[in-house]
Image (tube, grey):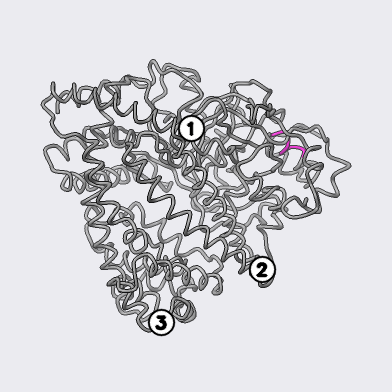
Amino acid sequence: MKVWLACLLFAGAALGSATAWSDEGMWPLQLLHGVEPSSEWLTRVRAASARLANCSATFVSADGLLLTNQHCVRNCLAERSSRRVNLVSAGYLASARDREASCSSQVADVLLDTQEVTSAIEAATRNLDARAANAARKKTLTDLEHTCHEQSRTTDPDAQIRCEGVALYSGGQYYIYRYRRYTDLRLVFAPELAIAAFGGDPDNFQYPRWDLDVALLRAYDERGAPAHTPGFLRLNFNGPKAGERVYVVGNPGATFRNLTVAQLLEMRDVELPHAILRDSELRGRLIEFGRIRPANAQIAQTTLLSLENTLKVRRYELDALHDTERFDRLRREESDLRARFASLSRAGHVTADPWEQIARAQESNRQLALPHLYIEGGAGFESLLFNYARTLVRAADERPKPNDERLREYTDGALLRIEQTLRADVPVYAELEELTLSFSLARMREFLGPDNPLVQPLLAKDSPDSLARKLIGDTNLDKVAFRMKLWNGGAAAVNASHDPMIELARDVDPAARALRQRYEDEVEAPVQMASEQIARARFAASGTTVYPDANFTLRLNAGSVQGWRENDLPVIPFTRFRGLYARASGYDPFVLPTLWQHARGFVNPDTPMDISTSNDIVGGNSGSALLDAQGDIVGVIFDGNSHSIAGAFWYNPTDNRAVAVDTAALLEALRVVYGAGTLLTELGAPPG
């Protein structure tokens, strides 16, 4: 194994020093050395960038103001809504600081520093079989996170610090990322849904676009004062020019460019078709539910919007994996890498073929996929209230254990976030909960069979509809006080509870844990060990030109403002306000909000609205800043075109495009449409 370690250490030391800086690749900032932008530029950008629970954001004032997307704060808007008030549709503008609305379920993490710990993981897993190595790897990461937390008590005593183990290159490198966490976030501005998502699902992942998908939050510190953020990034309200070099800094969620052919075939033939089938039916049910009465449409709105987006992503991903030319290219690249591996393995006396190990693990995965998805993955219990119940039941079991023996999601570093989620007073709508829970129970019975050992006792005397109705109707988990009583009471309180949802979670948990253990032993462990070997082979074959798959950690990508050709016709990179008004038909989803209708004669119709760029992005980049060479913000990423979804697997410079809101559009909207003069002053806007 020494030959592999030598290759790994060489690649880790040299990464970035001779990197070919192209549009392709989402690079961790700590691996970019010796290339433009400068290290000072990178440090400044890192300090101003934030990761939300579901998106990216950037500090844009010295008082904790964060710029992101409207679709990234919809849960905040829904949290402040009710059956009578719908802020998702109406939008929100705080008239003063004391009117900024709490987002109790949101967080913002700012990356402080990173520490490579590959050698510690190597030492902990050396000479162990796959299962033992998997356990040792998790234990070591938990211990390293704990050490990081303890050290931070001295270095940052007044801040909430989160330390997180991160694998890059599928385990070729390991890091501890240290974050400053803000848990008191408040909503400052979000436009109406009709302008933030103008064109709705038909326009989603299309271009041209005319969307003002922006929002502003404010982070508050532990004393309840606006966070002190002097290292914020300034907005350049002139926006970018065609052809200009631009950078995206944010937290792309997940790419799969380094998976093996066997893993991609599993996605193509098993995972994606089943997910599309399930999501399509649920979408239909939600649409019909909303047609019963307007109140139903309102309470299902956020769920439906999210589901439609996910469904479209999965459909385009499946289309991409059926691209024969691209897939054949992946096969050839894998064949070349396997040949290189075989040569190096002979020199290092390594005999196991990691690609074969992964292929065998995929066979196990096919047997486990549906039971694991529906029982341990929770797809059979689609309900916010069940999620609360499972969290409480598992926490009751895990919290008494030593920290490094717990499930990774219940370690000390995760408990504050769990408590925040349980304490968040988000609306729960019983009829929507019944719909999703009934649907998921029925699908679990369909795909696992009525005689499945878990399904049979659950539905022996109930239909999915009747069981869902009883569970939702009789549980008290919709009440914050009840959840916190169980949380604070620990195992004694949870084990003594007769709440029906808690009882369900307790009944399900043994089977769920057993499936989890089988999956970890038969799929996760061998895949992880083999992936580490393949990562080292990539280092040896590609040297310093490789970049790691995205994993919702801070990355930087370079691109330029440009369009592309679609069906041999040019697509220009800018849209303008005049095109928005021309596209508005008066029928949903092409209806403009009242304020925008009234502003038609006052806004500058030539104002740039949305931009397409060649930046390499993926989900999670929503809310990312689009920066110019000076590090000023010239746009806010909110989407990509349909071709960008194949970017989960490969990057095509010909037509893969990111889509951003131009800062010129933000200035014109805040000034003319919303009259937000105080906010514009804080953002450093020029006088109008």
* Left or right of 549, for residue 675: right
Quadrant location, the C terminus: top right
* Left or right of 509, for residue 81: right
Residue 165 colored in magenta in the image? no
Question: As rendered, which of 437 and 135 lies closer to the eye?
Answer: 437
Q: Residues within 10 Å of mark 2 (few under 14, many from 20)?
A: few
* Left or right of 514, for residue 113: right
Q: Marks 3/2: CA distance?
A: 27 Å
Q: Is the Cβ of the residue at disc 3 closer than 8 Å to that at disc 1? A: no
**Secondary structure state at the residue bearing disc 3:** loop
Q: Earlier in the sequence, mark 3 or mark 1?
A: 1
Question: As rendered, which of 336 and 135 lies closer to the eye?
Answer: 336
Q: Which residue: 55% across, 29% down?
A: 615
Q: Amino acid at mark 2?
A: Arg
Residue on which the image places disc 1: 46
Quadrant location, the N terminus: top left
Q: Amino acid at mark 3?
A: Asp
Residue on which the image places disc 2: 291
Q: Is the Cβ of the residue at disc 2 closer than 8 Å to that at disc 1? A: no
Q: Position of residue 366 (x, y in %)?
A: 30, 52
Snapshot quadrant of residue 684: top right
Numbered label attached to residue 462: 3
Q: Marks 2/1: CA distance?
A: 46 Å
Q: Amino acid at mark 1?
A: Arg
Magenta span: chief secondary structure: helix
Q: Position of residue 672 (x, y in %)?
A: 81, 42
